Image: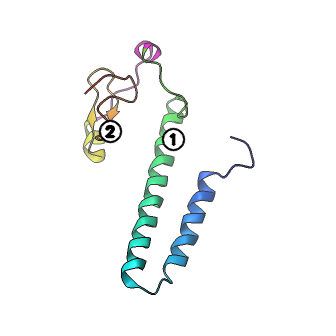
Amino acid sequence: MSDDEPKLDAFLRHLQAEVDTASEIADNKERDERLFQLEVAIQEAIIFANRYRELQSQGVNPMMLVDPKIQADHPAPPATKSQSILLGAHVCESCGKLLESDLDFCPSCGAKK
């Protein structure tokens, strides 16, 4: 990423500015819908930032796709039961990583659910 590209914190500031602007929308329904959209976008950006930092702290490049062969040699630590409950996710039976509910395969090792 080059220095002139926007960063996540700049995106979050932009979203917050949009919240301030959306608060001035006269129509109640339209204002509520726009504020809801912005709040969801802010939450997703925060979740992304947290996941990104977590992967980096484990020595994983979050922007690189995982090669299943390499992953088998260096398996990631399995998710704890409390992590699975809190995130509402299941754990991959092959590699122990958290599974996303909307995917039918493990994004870490490629194993099918």
- Residue drawn 55% across and 71% down? 18
Q: Is residue 90 above or below residue 46?
A: above
State the CA–CA distance, disc 1 to disc 2: 15 Å
Relative to residue 106, is residue 47 depicted above or below?
below
Q: Quadrant of the N terminus?
A: top right
What amino acid type should be assigned to the residue bearing mark 1?
Answer: Tyr
The residue that disc 2 covers is 100
Residue tagged 1: 52
Q: Amino acid at mark 2?
A: Glu
What x and y, as percent, mark residue 86? 28, 47
| Image x and y of residue 97, in percent | 35, 29
Q: Nearer the viewer, mark 1 or mark 2?
A: 2
Q: Residue 8's x, y, as percent?
A: 59, 52
Q: Where's residue 45, x and y in %?
A: 49, 53
Residue range (magenta)? 69-80
How crowded pointer 2 is (Cα within 10 Å; few <14, some 14-19, many 20+) is rated as some
> Which element type, helix, strand or loop, lies under badge 2?
loop
